[in-house]
Amino acid sequence: MNEQVKIPRTTPRFSATFDPHTLSEIRRAAATGIYDIRGGGSKRHLPHFDDLLFLGASMSRYPLEGYREKCGTSVTLGTRFAKKPIELKIPITIAGMSFGSLSAQAKEALGRGASLVGTSTTTGDGGMTQEERGHSNILVYQYLPSRYGMNPDDLRKADAIEVVVGQGAKPGGGGMLLGQKISPRVAQMRTLPEGIDQRSSCRHPDWTGPDDLEIKIEELREITDWEKPIYVKVGASRPYYDIALAVKAGADVIVLDGMQGGTAATQEVFIEHVGIPTLAAIRPAVQALQDLGMHRKVQLIVSGGIRNGADVAKALALGADAVSIGTAALVALGDNDPHWESDYEMLGTVAGAYDDWHEGRDPAGITTQDPDLAKRLDPIGAGRRLANFLSVLTLETQTIARAAGKSHVHNLEPEDLVALTVEAAAMAGVPLAGTNWIPGAEKR
């Protein structure tokens, strides 16, 4: 009797174009007829700081000894026009995240953590809460197109003002706050009806270009007696021209937010397909400042995907004066913590992938206005965790700077870097590792 030959079958293979996530999104869209909304920044693979490496000191450079030779980390922001520039002990700040998108406990924790290490935090869309002003030694007040919660008294209470033109996660777009997060307090602060979805404006209502921005900055200076540094925040899309125009309009500080930067909520298609990566935005921005003779005179803060001290050091080496963190700060507070895994599973997700911040059901009590969930976050303990994280970022940045022979983290420079890929070399304007080739650079 002939034994039947069993023919092996090939392993099922998914399309790289129509991968399982793409297929599930097509089915979801077909079932609902609405686009997907989520929080956070881009999740696709993009050229990033991991594509750069530092060249440690050896024969041609002399390293600093970590326990005896100092490496400074302080930074002064707003030296151009403001009577009272901001002095930070570390070059890492907390990005703007609104009360409304975050709970009051989370806002308090951000202020506590930032203050413990001598840096600033930022309000976000929706006004200033007593909790964050009370627990933030240095507080930057965001001035947004929506004007939610804006009033001159709070402008004067702030230590600096940040005029938001755009965000890296959605340059050219406005924010969203769904009705389930518009609690009575949020509604009162924003002068909105409770429980009704709202969408923030994508542009300021009273200006149409850089000339109007210049007038607005003058108004803000007069309201605050020229004391407060005025920041201008832009989403990374055309950084050379945007930074040049912000300088012309009179900015003291420019915040440049790459597409890995987070948002409380917007369309998935916006987050993943509009803007440019943080790595690609820094060098054109620095070039604009250098061409205008304003590098280090108008300070540059870079945000969007900063995760560790290496990222901080690389941003500074490319020409930034400071960085800003948002998503990493929320994780330090307790966002997406495996401790809440069973709660995340009930929401149909897992810890580490949860991004439905707009729904207000955050088990960690951070991106919610539900009073029972918000109580889960202890602002004192969460603030301490954030301070620990910021301290580690600073120590890691110093470690790299010392290895490169620098007595201050601001002395890091592009010549300390090489790139692992042609794309990163071209974007960062540094040589491909092992060569002296910078793609796109003119030969001398």
Image: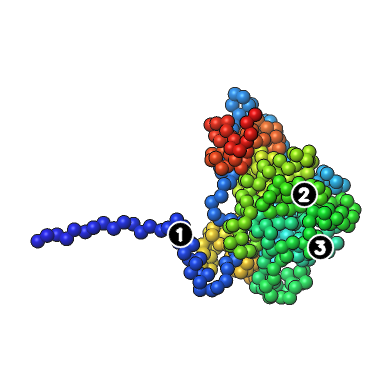
Query: From mark 3 to mark 1, how far is it between C-alphas?
Result: 44 Å
Residue 296, above or below 329: above
Residue density around tag 2, few if under 14, some if 14–19, many if 20 or more, within 10 Å: some
Residue density around tag 1, few if under 14, some if 14–19, many if 20 or more, within 10 Å: few
What mark, if any, has residue 245 been given in the picture? Answer: 2
- As helix, strand or loop, the secondary structure at mark 3 comes to loop
In which image quadrant can residue 267 be found? bottom right
Q: Which amino acid type is shown beneath numbered disc 2? A: Leu
Q: Position of residue 82 (x, y in %)?
A: 85, 47
Residue at the spot 73% in from the left edge and 74% down from the top edge: 184
- As helix, strand or loop, the secondary structure at mark 1 comes to loop
Q: Position of residue 347 (x, y in %)?
A: 53, 68
Q: What residue is pinned by disc 1? A: 19
Mark in the foreground, 1 or 2: 2
- As helix, strand or loop, the secondary structure at mark 2 comes to helix
Q: Position of residue 236 (x, y in %)?
A: 67, 51
Residue at the spot 46% in from the left edge and 57% down from the top edge: 17
What mark, if any, has residue 206 been given in the picture? Answer: 3
> Can residue 396 be seen here?
no
What mark, if any, has residue 361 been given in the picture? Answer: none
